[in-house]
Amino acid sequence: MDGPSPQAAPLPGAPATAGTRQVFLPNEVDPTVFDEAFLRQLERLLLLMRSPVRGGLKGGRRSVKRGQSVEFADYRDYAPGDDLRQLDWNVYARLEKLFVKLFVEEEDVTISLLIDASASMTYGAPSKLLFAKRAAAALGYIGLASEDRVRVAALSGRIARRRAALRGSGRVFRLLSDLSAIEAADGATDLLAAARHAAAQLHGRGVVILLSDLLDPAADRVIRELAATGSELIVLHVLSPDELEPPLEGDLHLLDSETGEGIDVTVDLATLDAYKARLAAWKAGFADTAAKRRATYVDLPSDANLSDLMFAELRRRRVLG
Amino acid sequence: MPFTSPLALLGLLFIPAVLAMYMLKLRRDQAVVPSTLLWSRLLTDVEANAPWQRLRRSLLLLLQLLLVIVIALLAARPFLERPTGLARDIVLILDTSASMAATDVSPTRLDAAKAAAIDALKDLPTGGKVSVIAADRTARIVVNETSDLGRVRQAVNDLQASTMPGDLGDALELASKLAARSGDAQVLVATDAAIATMPTVRVGAPVKVLSVGRDRKNQAIVALAVRTAPSTVTRSVFIGVANLDLEAAQRRIEVWGDGNLLEARDISIDAQARSDVVIDDIPNEIRALEIRLVGQDPTSSVAPDHLAIDDRAWAVIPPDRTRLILVVGEGDPYLETALSYLPNVELYGVTPAEYGPASARKDGRPWDLVIFEAALPTTLPDSPILAIAPPRTSPLGQVDGTLKEPGIGSVDPAEPILRYVDLSTTHIAEAAKLVLPDWARTVIPGPKGAPLLYAGSRSGLPTAVLAFEPRQSDLPLQVAFPILLANLTGELLGGSAAPTEALEPGTPVSLTIPSGATGLTVTRPDGTTTDLVPSASGGAAVTFARTDLLGIYTVTPVLGAGASTAPGATAGASAGPSAGASPLASPGPSSGASATPPPAIDPYAPVHFAVDLFDVGESTIAPGSAAAIEALGTAPGASPAPGAAGTDAPATTRDELWVPLLLIVLVALCVEWAVYHRDAVTRMRRDLAARFGRPSPDRGA
């Protein structure tokens, strides 16, 4: 794959570093993350799928259809009308039978990036939503570079706000623009309803990547229903460091950022220990659900290094290859 | 359970206050979190599965309630009562005589007696009062009827062993009176009972002796005297040493003169015997002697006996000096006889007609005293004067005629000239009628304000005027006459006469203030000084009573403005700290013919005197009979003295329970601290476990 297209030239006023070509990025995306070297590395990655999928257009991904690629798949008997160029003359010389060589057809798939835009995603340093956007940008770029279709949808309220599907690495700026346009919802978000809405918009099998903090009572059903769509589901569970290690102590009245409801709690070491145990069990429940549905579950802190995430963590989890 | 201060139980009213603090709604800080999803599930878990959490939270409440209760109990001072073996009130006599410094009981008998007394007072009944009497030469009350045992302990611990002989009689008499005032009292006597003569006083209360001491090993210097050798060039020292032990003893006598060791002599003394030692050839210029009774092995660190204070003695050697007295008169045998008996006096006499410039001494030395007997020259000499029956008015005073058979008025008992002088039977036939001049004080008052004897300092010269001739009265026939004459000439001769013989410890001493001096400064053996000033009546002598330390005391006149040392006077020899010389009133031959010309006298030179124990009874440290002392009191359980406010109820003592309560408070505070900071403690334990690589046992609990 070639490098960034001429569209990637810095626009007037865009930050640029001498000797390093940079792409134009939304304000909230750290420009140092998406420098040319990082993009080059991303281009070498491929979103792995557990099984070949049937796509629409001819793409760079193995398909269940036999097609025109160079990768041999099988033989079948010759039938009138077959392309004579596909006959295997060597076999005919040995067996005096006509066989047609079948090759793996390379097709594109649709990668759906479902980003939880609930109010709870705005918390953390950096915020979980920003981290989700960055991760989605990286994964989307990998998809574009793989000639896959990439579609972004923001889950807020009870719906999924879907953007147009993008294809080809030249649409990376549109991808970034779409990501930067995602804003957190003001009110409460029904993650299950929004996920069902997004599932209804899927066409055929593909890859669904859910980036969410899963702070919803029905988060388990969200995973189950998205996995039931036939697409391969990847759940990137993003939690902020403050949620992993709450910096709370004393007698507190905790207010829910989405619902505004409050509860009284006395936070001491025993309470924190119980919280952490509860958190671990909660995440283990998601991982178990995902495993049963042949989905991939990856929990991430929002302060994780994006490079480490892409080149180490996700490759270790067999999400990227 | 009884309480000393039951009103303090009102502190339990704080319990509702503590409960109210917990019942009030807690003001909580608000914190916005992304979602309360996990927290609400957590609370459900905690409330459903961990009742210990609630208990832990209320543990602080329980601890605080416990603290309130225990502190209220503590303030109420609960106690337990138990019967005691002591009477309600205690009169404690603590023997502080010299023998109580004996070291046969470590560290001393007095310290052991203090400990025994304080231990006995632990059983003081409730409400009982304690009086403490220190008994040495006299008895003095150091604590009077107090129930404050802390004050009693402090007073007992502050007592020091004196150097004085003990007299338990006074202390027992005083204790008996204190006990009689109480009605239900007991006398505790902490003593070694080492007393020469058993008191005969009867004590109207039971007497219990806290006996200390167990050994009698002691040798003591019991006599010391210095005399001029017949050669008049050297002196001899007589030393008496008594062995009061039941075994023979070998000791060494060291003679120190003016700070230098002059001679050492080993002696052997039989048991219960006395050895007198004479050491000759003490140089004449030695002014202070110190005798030390030491062990024969000077390198031994073991004390040769148990009482050290009687192993040292001091003596002051006054210089041999003569005083020159000129009597101008027709000759009164009574007067001359009395004057001739004065020590160190050369007496000369001339008739009034012969008196004049020709009567001056050829050696140029002035007369130390001129006595005019019924005569006065036209020009008075510049020397101290005693005028007897002055015939006319002169600078010595106004004469307004004669008095027939004048009576003697009331005399001042503090008048030093009249010390030991009894004039109660004295009759006077005729006396000059004198008018008291402004420079003099009346010594013997006469009728209508006319003094019969007055004395004072006239222009810096000691002067006295006697209104009658001795032979015109029966005074010369009385023993008071030589004493009066000795006192009078002593003051007129101008010396600050100090005692020449060693004093007993605690004995008051009369010190004469020389003419021209405004007072005296007495330096004690320990270096402390005491300033003495004349009494308001203008007497020329003052009394010094702080002679409780053994050693040499130095008396230094304090010079007033205008007074100065006499020309040519020799300052007091001071070869050592205890050295010195008394220029006046030194004992010796009445008219000793000194081989060397007598030096001039400096009336302002320091004088010295010594204080020595010299008490065989006190040096006998053998513990006496406690039963004999206890027999002086009434039998235990006897009825109190008639009229005393006795009580039939058995005496009890209280054991306050503040110690266990205080421990409970401390433990409760520690537990409360641990509960309140349990998170910090757990974190610290986890950090330590992590640092040393061991998994915390409660991690993830």
Image (cartoon, helix red, strand yellow):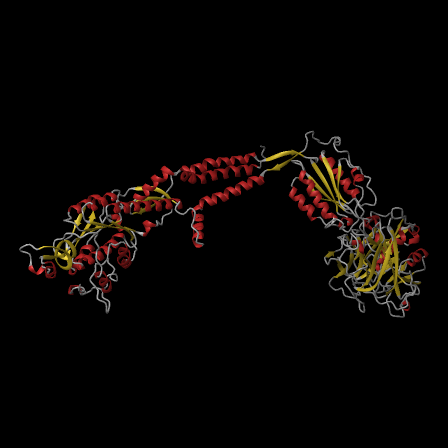
Q: Is residue B585 visible?
A: no
Q: Position of residue B11 (x, y in %)?
A: 51, 36
Image quadrant holding the C terminus of chain B, namely top left
Question: Which residue occupies the extreme top position in the image?
Answer: B648
Q: From the viewer's perspective, tell me whether residue A69 is left or right of residue B67.
A: left
| Image location (x, y in percent) of residue B120 | 70, 40
Can residue B185 be seen in the rendering of this structure? yes
Is A71 placed above or below B75 here?
below
| Quadrant assignment, res B264 | bottom right
Of the pair B35 and A106, the residue shown nearer to us: A106
- Coordinates of residue B93 in the picture (x, y in percent): 74, 42
| Picture coordinates of residue B25, whole percent (x, y) | 38, 39
Left or right of residue B443: residue B79: left
Q: Pick whichever, A198 or B223, lies toward us.
A: A198
Q: Which residue is at the far bottom?
A: B363
Counting every numbered tag in the picture gives: 0
Quadrant of the image containing the N terminus of chain B? top right
Horizontal side of A192 relative to B480 (left or right) equals: left
| B30 over B400 or under it: above or below | above
Q: Name the one closer to the observer, B246 or B581.
A: B246
The outermost residue toward the left is A81
Give B391 or A58, whichever is nearer the viewer. Answer: A58
